[in-house]
Image (cartoon, rainbow, N blue to C red):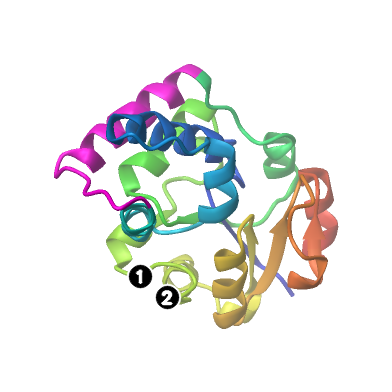
Amino acid sequence: MIKCIIFDCDGTLVDSEYLCNLGLEIKLRDYGVESSATKMMEHFRGGKLATILQTIESQHQIKLRDDFVGSYRELVDELFEKALKPCEGVSAALTEINLPKCVASSGPLEKINKALSISGLSRYFEGNVFSSYVVGSWKPDPDLFLHAAKEMGFQPSECAVVEDSVVGVVAAKSAGMRSILYDPNGIHDPELSPFTIQHMKELQAAIT
């Protein structure tokens, strides 16, 4: 029986994947790199920023300046303030599902909390927010989810993870948790998870 739900943040709770990659698109123009946000979303969804930047440096034979990450984060903050919204149906689903909930994301804690605040979702999690940067482990490793379950007071088998990325689903499965793939645009292989939803109104049925 599922007793606790662990949510990814970017692309699952908040519609931020495009904004994050738009920030990359804009910043990379300074280096003569023309790479669309949409294309980067396809390649880097759910990934660790440091690994993404290493890949970009290798692919385009460039060296990013030491201040790149800081200036990129500032730009994403600005984009969030202007345009960040919850994913469709998220608020209704969070209200409907009367189970303990938390967020476990690969992003920095400050970024996660800001996204939840701007989108009006903070109230659903009561400060139960866990970051790879604090735990020191990134998906597809299961440690972030295992840490979240322990802090919430549940066994892995009692937890369901809602994710929009392949690495997140792999991490959930490795942690021994039910993986629920949120795939609103049908971009993933349907074999990736037996619990796949295209709208948050389907979430209640996926955890029962």
Which contiguous range is marked in magenta? 60-82
Find residue 143 and name its label: 2
Q: Position of residue 205 (x, y in %)?
A: 85, 58
Q: Are the residues at dot 2 and dot 1 in contact (C-beta closer than 8 Å)?
A: yes
User: Relative to 131, is 141 above or below?
Assistant: below
Q: Position of residue 81 (x, y in %)?
A: 43, 21
Residue at (56, 41) in percent of width and height: 124
Element type where label 1 sits in the image: loop
Indicate which disc, 2 or 1, sits on the residue closer to the N terminus: 1
User: Relative to 8, is 69 above or below?
Assistant: above
Quadrant location of residue 66?
A: top left
Q: Residues within 10 Å of mark 1 (few under 14, many from 20)?
A: some
Element type where label 2 sits in the image: helix
Residue at (22, 45) in percent of width and height: 64
Quadrant location of residue 30?
A: top left
Tell which of 125 and 27 is nearer to you.
27
Residue bearing mark 1 = 137
Residue at (44, 35) in percent of width and height: 34
Q: Is residue 193 left or right of residue 169?
A: right
Residue at (68, 69) in percent of width and height: 179
